[in-house]
Amino acid sequence: MGAGVGVIKRFLAGAAAVGTVAGVGFLYYAWYPALPPVAPPAAGTFSPEQIERGRIVAAEGYCAECHTRTDGTPGPELAGDYRMETPFGAIHSSNITPDVETGIGSWSEAAFKRAMRLGVSREGEHLIPAFPYDHFTKMTDQDLSDLYAFLMTRPAVHLAIRPNELPFPLSLRIMQAGWKLMFFTPGAYKPDPSHDALWNRGAYLAEGNAHCGACHTPRNAMGAEKKSAQYDGAVVDNWIAPPLNAHNPTPTTWTEDELFQYLRFGVAPLHGPAGGPMSPVPHRFLSTVPEEDVHAIAHYYADIDHAAERSKHDAAALALAMEQSRAGLTGPNPDPDAKLYQGACAACHYNAAPSPILGRPDLALNNALWLDEPTNLFQVMLHGLSAEEGQSGVAMPSFYNALSDADMARIAAYLRRTRTTLPPWTDLEKKAAAVRSTVQSVPVNSSH
Ligand code: HEC
Ligand code: HEC
Ligand code: HEC
């Protein structure tokens, strides 16, 4: 008995000692000094060429997308206060215009680079990884200098952001240091010598600044991307960002050219348009950067999704899809679900040609029918697509008012049954209602 207690006591003493060492070590690891404030760089500090390079870097990292308020009164570009709902609570992005009081006007280039590489503010506080510094850490010193030049030459906007809504203890910024210890690997991108320069450029952009994995890779319970499931697809803002690897379920391959068209122009000839949270990636950003960079990203993902092998089956998959799409639509069809589809959708989604016409996506080839859940299909039916999304100039009306949840469920079941070879979706009406409940207001383009 006595011996046993002694062992436990020694064990506890040992554990306490280890705990203290770990605590001190952790504080040492977690502590960063505040960096001294500086006067904002004078006009003429940066060359026009450098500022233009910085504009491209900012576009490839979508800084304006997350640093511009969209709820309530829309805010000025880059002045922050964009509200991000996370499973832990809402977070508001920072003002990154050169305003001294509310923005980053007093940040030196060194302070800016530390934030991008390590997720630490000028004041020495840990930033929340909703700011994707886990990707930005991969950026080169030159790109970060150019980005700084661009940001520091934007108009300074005085705008204080709303406080974050994280519960205690997550509200303590020191908690973020624990997250970093577990999930964050700092360091610039290291080129892979087994691949050529184009591939490495694509990997550098995709893994770093363009942070595609922030939406397309599933996250663990702590909100970190699961490295073992990279690009397996994930839920983001009530949409599904489909897999970008060999698990992508669409019947025709995301080849380098399909990827390039999609990322550059927002619509791929076979797969259709970029909708929802993907829409700004091409339309607002990648359409404004050098074409070679978009080619590089496309080249990289065509390798990751094994396009070379998979595309051998594309001709057969395309022929089958076109046949499935036409079946039941020529002549009378007794199936009431087919009639519903015919009335609501077929006028625009019918392709008689050997392959779909651009701007008239063939639903048999679109990810909305092939994903494990009907989320994206319901999103598109409820919101429609504006003329700025997908192929520019063509639009799809919202069916928010025209179709009930039961109607949407029937159309979804019908399309899944007749256009794919996959098992039926379940609980469709419930899922339609769930997606509808996320729609903030009736879309303006709503038919009927
Ligand atoms: C996915 C959304 C998202 C994107 C994209 C994004 N940011 Fe942020 N950023 C945030 C959020 C959220 C914060 C606030 C984090 C916090 O409160 O800890 C932030 C904070 C920052 C900060 C710290 C500012 C401060 O006052 O502490 C800087 C600097 C910054 N971002 C720069 C950029 C730049 C430059 C880009 C583009 C290359 C960019 N961000 C892209 C979400 C984003
Ligand atoms: C803000 C989140 C977000 C970011 C960032 C993002 N995506 Fe997406 N992506 C989505 C969503 C959501 C969809 C589904 C859109 C749809 O169905 O219309 C999508 C669709 C796609 C598709 C079509 C897949 C299919 O099977 O239909 C491709 C390809 C793609 N994204 C590539 C990329 C690449 C490459 C990047 C980085 C350069 C990227 N995405 C960045 C959210 C994102
Ligand atoms: C007035 C014409 C029209 C009608 C009616 C219509 N659509 Fe569309 N649909 C479009 C256009 C145009 C696009 C986008 C094409 C582009 O931008 O390249 C589209 C795209 C889609 C997409 C792809 C979305 C994405 O992000 O990948 C789906 C899915 C879809 N429609 C489903 C439907 C369904 C289901 C119906 C019936 C309830 C329907 N559509 C009715 C015109 C229409």
Image (cartoon, grey):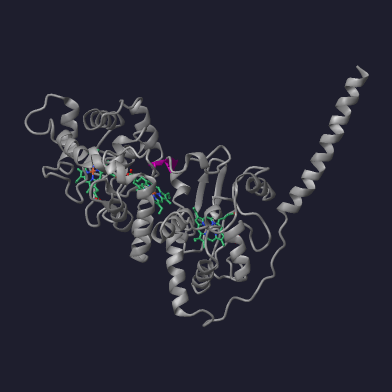
Front position in the image: 167 or 444: 167
**Residue 138 location (% of width, % of height):** 53, 58
| Residue 74 visible here | no
Q: Residue furthest top?
A: 1
Which region is colored magenta?
A: 233-243
The residue located at (26%, 55%) in the rendering is 387
Quadrant (top left/top right/bottom left/bottom right) for the N terminus? top right
On the picture, is 317 further left or further right than 2? left
**Residue 115 location (% of width, % of height):** 60, 61
Q: Residue furthest left?
A: 331
The residue located at (37%, 49%) in the rendering is 303
**Residue 320 location (% of width, % of height):** 18, 35
Q: Quadrant of residue 161?
A: bottom right
Q: Residue furthest right?
A: 2
| Residue 236 visible here | yes
**Residue 41 location (% of width, % of height):** 58, 77
Front position in the image: 403 or 372: 372
Front position in the image: 231 or 305: 305
On the picture, is 48 further left or further right than 171? left
Considering only vertical position in the picture, is 339 above or below 234? above
